[in-house]
Amino acid sequence: MYRYDTIDREMLADRAAEFRSQVGRRLAGDLSEDQFKPLRLMNGLYLQLHAYMLRIAIPYGSMNPIQLRKLAWIARTYDRGYGHFTTRTNLQFHWIKLRDAPDILDELASVDMHAIQTSGNCIRNVTADPYAGATAEEVDDPRVWAEAIRQWSTFHPEFSFLPRKFKIAVTAAPKDRTAARVHDIGLVLKRARDGALGFEVIVGGGMGRTPHIGPTIREFLPVNRLMSYLEAILRVYNRHGRRDNIYKARIKILVAALGVEEFTRQVEAEWLKMDAQAEGGVDLPDTELARIRGAFAPTGFESLPLQSEPLELEKAANPAFARFVRNNLKPHKKPGYGIVEISLKAVGETPGDATADQMDVVADLAERYGQGDIRVTHEQNLVLPHVKLDDVPAVWAGLREAGLATPNINLVSDIIACPGLDYCALANARAIPVAQNIAEKFRDEERAELIGELKIKISGCINACGHHHVGHIGILGVDKKGEEFYQLTLGGSGAEDAALGTILGPALPYDRVADAVDTLVDVYLRERTDGERFLDTFRRTGVAPFKEAVYADAH
């Protein structure tokens, strides 16, 4: 993974010292809350329902054991012993005291971490495929480009005060594990027939109040022109993006208002103008690209047989381990290795939460068995991307002891959920207990495997932090005269076949949601043909059989 250099570390130290001064002035009463708000947001500090929340950046979801142990230490020392992993691959601490925030930033800086650009109208944490560098599907390592974008965009003066927050995702595999098409910019690495490497550039995706699937504005951008093209996009956005209406300020609104053809024309014109004015030098020099790429060069792999006798013996002897292998172990590009995905969705727990003790266990396992590499997924799970197949039984045993061996990746209880009304001042309804109720309904692991891939995503308000618009089953909390109701959508996808869900019907009360999901699953099992996922069946049958069953049951 990328290691911070002297410039990176000086930047973090300066920012932490600056914020310490700002916090001191706020605590002394020299700054009002209104004056302090933009300063704290620039450092990832939010004021939520019960306390301050600190959002920590995990660029492209990549950490080492030292960093994860530091997060565990912060959880014990300054929070309530746990943290919450988010759909932006960040980590949130929800019980922070203002006076402690500068000390936490110093601690983060000591392990090359920070909270910069996790809030505010700037380019947020850049995300990438959590299987990067491990999957045989990819045409290049997307982390290289995500790191280049991080360095280019951090404190970029032209893009520090955009009309609204801005999110970029980079993927390099046919299977999209980043939800690229619902980002402000999605970048898909591809190879041309002649072997040249380039990006499909997607602009104007997003969720929230007005969800959009992003259109492609360039089918193939040579990789050596990435930075200047991104700059052209952001210049057009800065020029025309709405600053008078927060609900119409995202780039998705601009792309829709101008139309894809006109927006593309303006970006291309801006890009050509930059070249004509000799401003195209923002593109990444080959020497700098080589420096960054060197940080991600594969190391430590051994020549191993394709099959693992210890793994096969344990599978034959232990049904629980066999189920974990079926659902949580993914193919690796190197023979004899596997990608282990760690579910943070144990039945009864909060989706995305990990205790300090659990973080320490994952750090230890990564250090001993996983080449010191840990990833966070946008689906709020963790990944050990490089594990010898021979070591998978030992990894599973360590995870099981820590309560982290739930074998449900991509199954019905692997639910995305935002913190909702339990924490967030913007939420209309709770999300966590809804997720817990649904997971309990599908506690039977055999039934969950029978159901197969089913992505449930829950948001506590229209801001859609739980990605409900692109859930196979999406659940949105709404307020009806002070009571919590939930609107269900079906048929969404955040993957390479991205689609927005179709509203099922009138919103349901809190105590009907889990039963309604159970009914939806029953309809799917009745209607599906061999090999069909829930999403496939819905796309074939449409909403009618699902709607009829849920609302007949409701009455």
Image (cartoon, helix red, strand yellow):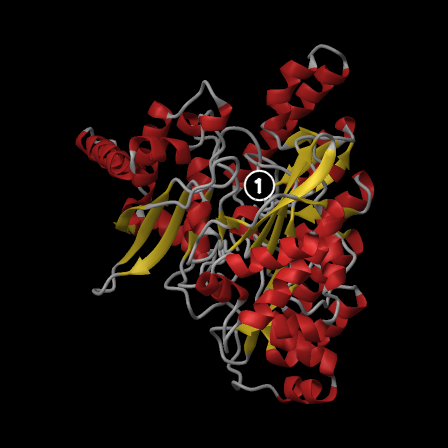
Residue in view at x 43 percent, y 70 percent: 136
Residue 452 appearing in the image: no
Residue holding disc 1? 464
The kind of secondary structure element at disc 1 is loop
Label 1 CA crowd tier, 10 Å (few <14, some 14–19, many 20+): many
Judge whether 32 appears above or below 48 on screen.
above
x and y, in percent, of residue 282 in the image: 31, 37
Number of numbered tags placed on the structure image: 1
x and y, in percent, of residue 301 in the image: 52, 73
User: In the image, what residue type sits under mark 1?
Assistant: Ala
Residue in view at x 64 percent, y 73 percent: 449
461 horizontally vs 221: left or right: right
x and y, in percent, of residue 419 in the image: 69, 42
Residue 275 appearing in the image: yes
The residue positioned farthest toward the left in the image shown: 276
- Residue 421 occupies which quadrant of the picture? top right
Residue in view at x 34 percent, y 35 percent: 255
x and y, in percent, of residue 130 in the image: 53, 58
Closer to us: 192 or 391: 192
The residue positioned farthest toward the top in the image shown: 30
Residue in view at x 64 percent, y 63 percent: 412
